[in-house]
Amino acid sequence: MNETERAMNERLLDDYRRAVCEMLAAEEFRRIENSSQKHAAIIIEEMIGHAQHSFCAVAQTLNPVVWSPRVIAALSSAMAKGVTVSLLVVAAGDLAHLNTLPAEVRSHVRRAERPDVIGINFAVMDDKAVRIEHDVANDRASFCVNEDELAHLAQNKFNSLYEAGTAI
């Protein structure tokens, strides 16, 4: 990728980030589809940054593109301002990546007890915003805000999976 393409790609990602922030500030239902790990990282980072009370996520793996240093820093910052953070990792082989996480984040990560029953990645913020990856192999996901019923269902599902998980 040459310098011009790289600059254009960065502008597109900045535009995407602005759109996600506008969604999170909206009072009405909004939804977008995404199929990029970089888009996933932006959505998750902004969900964490906008969280007032809680952020939780189920991740098949701690993919370093999605769970980038910026996202990990956002988790630490959110926790410092009192946001409850909980992560559930499905793939046991990926746990070695946990050593790169700050201790305060690592202490809120659990391993899925029954990884065979969790086939998707999803995240929930404050019972307001939800990102559900419905095609893990192709990184296809829906991100929506202000869909209270979906957020509540996703939060309840996360809570039951997390409670059944094993501390790392």
Image (spheres, rainbow, N blue to C red):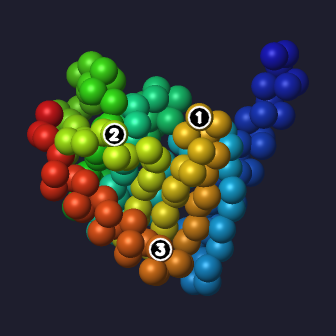
Residue flagged by tag 2: what amino acid is it? Asp
Earlier sequence position, callout 3 versus callout 2? 2
- Circle 3 residues within 10 Å: few <14, some 14–19, many ≥20: some
Against 52, residue 106 (above or below) is above
Residue flagged by tag 1: what amino acid is it? Ala
Against 115, residue 164 (above or below) is below
Against 110, residue 131 (above or below) is below
Rendered location of residue 56, percent (x, y): 33, 55
Residue flagged by tag 3: what amino acid is it? Leu
Quadrant containing the N terminus is top right
Rendered location of residue 158, percent (x, y): 30, 59
Q: Secondary structure at mark 2?
A: helix
Q: Which mark is residue 116?
A: 2
Q: Secondary structure at mark 1?
A: helix
Rendered location of residue 78, percent (x, y): 31, 54
Earlier sequence position, callout 3 versus callout 1? 1
Q: Please name which of the two marks, 1 or 2, marks the residue nearer to the observer.
A: 2
Q: Which mark is residue 137?
A: 1
